[in-house]
């Protein structure tokens, strides 16, 4: 709870002093502060944190829309380097102000967490600013060529006439938006930071899909953006025929006169980059690439683990999980002892896949929805705090399904109007084995991403930045932990589904090996693929998509296993030190009701909770 909203129960007649021992210039002295001193300093700190968050949000129209805020609804966020430099200066000034004007010693426990978290995040951003061009804004996973239309389709709601005109305004703003992105691409080009050759056919396919159909062609089918706009427009009531026609015309003109030329220019520049691209896949090829990658690992895992250490952890975890897989393999009646042969059986046997038809796609969606609904009814076993926002299961849209990942989660809006969404890529049903459906639904839905995100968004009495922040190790570590948790409470009754759980876990362990291999040890794309095929049971197409993902997102995939291992380590620490007083629901509250913290602060929180429990009568 943040101090601004706390009500202390101290008798008014008492001058109650809180004694705080702290390190200072005089180590033998103890600073003492009254409850009023602490309350005022906490209030000042929390006003500072929320003002910082609100000001940053006011400069980010896209994030406003994600939160369901319809301010600047017709605008895009500034993605120019000039804006990035300005943001960096603001962060530096805010960090200086925090350290100068907020007295850490006067803060209570929760506000100290906020202080440390704000300081940690700001310092990381400042340290990483020099590496701001060490990435691929144009890629097959979340490149702006597909992210821009996906944003309009999935985030920009049309609930009124002004919302519809704001949509058209955003279409008309794509010229400037793409100019800013192209400016950044050209800087990267000058530095030699160009995606590998294999990425470009995916990008070009995405571009072509956006500008295919009406109004660009004389055909009955509409392009994705026109179809989305008209579908949303048709849900509006009480608008006249003339208004509807005016809006439709405005959308079509923006698509033909702005969107099409912007995508044509992007396609031309993409072809130019493709001609320069090589088949080198790792970040090691970038300027100071190995140094950058070590920094990226630190940011992703929120630890000081070195590349070689992460590589070794991955190898050890792969070996451990393989041994668990062999036990389940025997439970299924498999007579041979060759794990690789069992992997091939799981990849190829038709019983593990729905047909690659519309009916098969619906079967998978229904299965995933049913798994989430069943778990939702059992949450009292694991949790004291439950999510308020709803969750839905959707197939990835056709315009990006060939390039998008296998599954992912999109946050609900802060106001609850837009539910959380578990996206499953059903382009090729052979890439979505049934035996992994249970673990995947727990990961992306409940108790995984949706549980963590929706609970954080609904927290009260806490600075906004703690509710809406995040880091890969915490967020994905929790989701991977959420795959294991149901197993410990009797779920995964089908041994093949339990094998699927282990398949997902070994997948995340293998990522540690492969990611470091690609970006630090100069592994080729083929080497990485062969390691995955040998050590995981995932379908061939899924393995290839995953390797391609790691190549364009250096370090991102390492956060899952590192985060999960830390949560398990902390849970074991708490269980060992509390014995019979350990309550899994209380432990989960400590993890989930403080926002998405770096692992170092999460560790502090759990240890503090354990110490308090030990002192209770």
Image (spheres, rainbow, N blue to C red):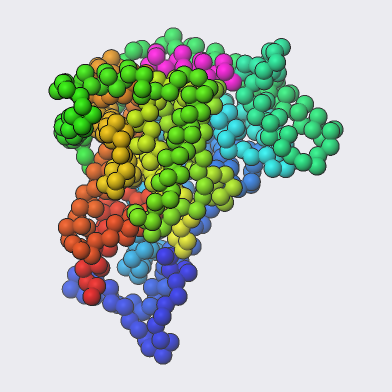
**Where's residue 580, x and y in %?**
20, 63
Q: Main secondary structure of the magenta part?
A: helix
- Whether residue 115 appears in this view of the structure is no
Q: Residue 429: which quarter of the image?
A: top left
Residue shown at 85%/33% (left/top)? 242
Q: Nearer the viewer, residue 538 or 265?
A: 538
In the image, residue 438 sits, relative to residue 341, either above or below, namely: below
Image quadrant in which the N terminus is located: bottom left
In the image, residue 77 sits, relative to residue 256, either above or below, namely: below
Q: Is residue 414 left or right of residue 122?
A: right
In the image, residue 264 sits, relative to residue 173, either above or below, namely: above
Q: Nearer the viewer, residue 85 or 603?
A: 603
Residue shown at 47%/68% (left/top)? 4
Q: Is residue 588 left or right of residue 68?
A: left
Q: Nearer the viewer, residue 277 or 411?
A: 411
**Where's residue 21, x and y in %?**
24, 72
Q: Is residue 519 left or right of residue 86?
A: left
Q: Residue 179: which quarter of the image?
A: top right
Image quadrant in which the C terminus is located: bottom left
Q: Residue 307: which quarter of the image?
A: top left
Residue range in magenta is: 188-210
**Where's residue 390, x and y in %?**
52, 47
In the rendered image, residue 192 lying in the magenta stretch gets the answer: yes
**Where's residue 487, x and y in %?**
28, 43
Q: Nearer the viewer, residue 92 or 468?
A: 468
Q: Residue furthest top?
A: 275
Q: Residue furthest front?
A: 333
Q: Is residue 93 left or right of residue 163?
A: left
In the rendered image, residue 26 lying in the magenta stretch gets the answer: no
In the image, residue 460 sits, relative to residue 62, either above or below, namely: below
Residue shown at 38%/88% (left/top)? 14
């Amino acid at each position: 709870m943040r101090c601004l909203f706390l009500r202390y129960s101290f008798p008014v007649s008492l001058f109650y002093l809180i004694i705080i021992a702290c390190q200072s210039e005089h180590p033998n002295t103890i600073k003492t502060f009254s409850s009023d001193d602490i309350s005022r300093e906490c209030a000042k700190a929390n006003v500072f944190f929320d003002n910082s968050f609100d000001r940053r949000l006011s400069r980010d129209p896209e994030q406003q829309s994600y939160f369901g805020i319809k301010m600047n609804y017709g605008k895009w966020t500034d993605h120019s380097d000039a804006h990035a430099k300005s943001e960096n200066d603001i962060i530096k000034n805010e960090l200086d102000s925090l350290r100068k004007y907020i007295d850490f010693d006067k803060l209570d426990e929760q506000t100290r967490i906020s202080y440390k978290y704000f300081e940690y995040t700001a310092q990381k951003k400042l340290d990483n600013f020099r590496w701001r061009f060490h990435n691929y804004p144009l890629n097959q996973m979340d490149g702006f060529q597909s992210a821009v239309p996906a944003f309009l389709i999935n985030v920009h709601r049309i609930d009124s006439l002004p919302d519809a005109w704001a949509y058209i305004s955003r279409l008309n703003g794509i010229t400037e938006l793409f100019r800013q992105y192209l400016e950044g691409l050209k800087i990267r080009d000058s530095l030699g930071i160009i995606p590998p050759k294999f990425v470009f056919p995916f990008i070009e396919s995405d571009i072509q899909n956006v500008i295919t159909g009406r109004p660009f062609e004389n055909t009955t089918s509409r392009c994705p953006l026109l179809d989305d706009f008209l579908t949303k427009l048709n849900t509006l009531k009480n608008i006249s025929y003339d208004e509807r026609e005016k809006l439709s015309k405005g959308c079509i003109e923006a698509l033909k006169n702005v969107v099409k030329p912007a995508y044509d220019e992007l396609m031309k520049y993409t072809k130019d980059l493709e001609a320069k691209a090589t088949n080198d896949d790792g970040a090691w090829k970038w300027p100071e690439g190995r140094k950058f990658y070590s920094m990226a690992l630190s940011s992703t895992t929120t630890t000081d683990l070195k590349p070689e250490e992460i590589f070794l952890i991955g190898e050890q975890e792969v070996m451990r999980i393989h041994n668990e897989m062999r036990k389940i393999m025997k439970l299924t009646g498999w007579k041979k002892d060759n794990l690789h042969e069992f992997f091939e059986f799981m990849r190829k046997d038709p019983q593990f896949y729905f047909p690659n038809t519309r009916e098969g796609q619906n079967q998978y969606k229904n299965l995933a929805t049913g798994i989430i609904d069943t778990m939702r009814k059992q949450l009292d076993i694991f949790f004291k705090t439950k999510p308020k926002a709803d969750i839905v299961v959707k197939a990835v849209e056709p315009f990006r399904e060939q390039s998008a990942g296998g599954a992912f989660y999109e946050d609900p809006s802060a106001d609850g109007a837009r539910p959380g969404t578990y996206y499953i890529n059903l382009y090729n049903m052979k890439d979505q084995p049934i035996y992994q459906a249970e673990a995947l639904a727990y990961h992306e839905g409940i108790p995984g991403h949706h549980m963590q995100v929706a609970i954080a968004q609904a927290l009260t009495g806490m600075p906004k930045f703690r509710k809406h922040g995040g880091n890969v190790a915490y967020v994905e570590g929790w989701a991977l932990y959420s795959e294991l948790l149901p197993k410990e409470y009797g779920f995964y009754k089908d041994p093949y589904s339990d094998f699927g759980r282990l398949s997902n876990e070994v997948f995340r362990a293998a990522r540690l090996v492969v990611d470091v291999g690609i970006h630090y040890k100069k592994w080729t794309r083929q080497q990485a693929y062969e390691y995955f095929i040998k050590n995981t049971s995932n379908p061939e197409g899924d393995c290839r998509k995953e390797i391609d993902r790691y190549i364009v997102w250096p370090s991102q995939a390492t956060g899952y296993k590192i985060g999960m291992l830390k949560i398990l380590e902390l849970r074991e620490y708490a269980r060992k030190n509390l014995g019979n007083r350990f309550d899994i629901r209380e432990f989960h509250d400590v993890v989930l009701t403080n926002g998405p913290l770096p692992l170092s602060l999460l560790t502090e929180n759990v240890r503090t909770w354990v110490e308090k429990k030990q002192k209770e009568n």
